[in-house]
Image (cartoon, helix red, strand yellow):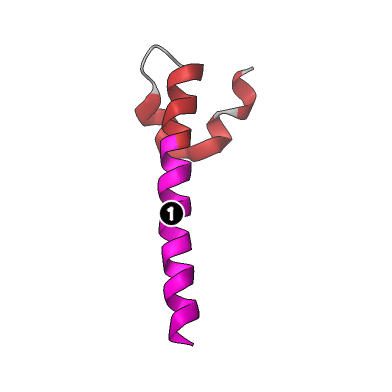
Amino acid sequence: GLEVAIRNKIEHEVTQKASTSLHKRLSVLKTPQGKAGAAGNTKTTNAAPSK
């Protein structure tokens, strides 16, 4: 029902915010040169091969 839809929406927003802030932190840690913008566009696909 409506309650489930609202809960799903809130969960989605919280997850989005959490993953965004976490990814920003990871981008800063992995690329101190300031490639955070580029990493943010490609999400986590960019993070794995950079080892």
Q: Secondary structure at mark 1?
A: helix
Return the residue nearer the eye: 8 or 32: 8
Q: Residue at 47% across / 61% down in the picture? A: 11
Q: Residue at 41% across / 37% down in the picture? A: 21
Q: Amino acid at mark 1?
A: Val
Asked if residue 14 is among those painted magenta in the image, a careful observer would answer yes
Occupied quadrant, residue 24: top left
* Main secondary structure type of the part rendered in magenta: helix
Occupied quadrant, residue 40: top left
Picture coordinates of residue 47 (x, y %)? Answer: 56, 28
Outermost residue to the bottom: 1
Magenta span:
1-21
Asked if residue 32 is among those painted magenta in the image, a careful observer would answer no
Picture coordinates of residue 16 (x, y %)? Answer: 44, 51
Would you name the residue on which mark 1 appears? 14
Q: Residue at 39% across / 29% down in the picture? A: 38
Please tell me whether residue 48 is drawn above or below residue 1 in the rendered image.
Answer: above
Occupied quadrant, residue 45: top right
Q: Neighbour class for label 1 at 10 Å: few (<14), some, many (≥20)? A: few
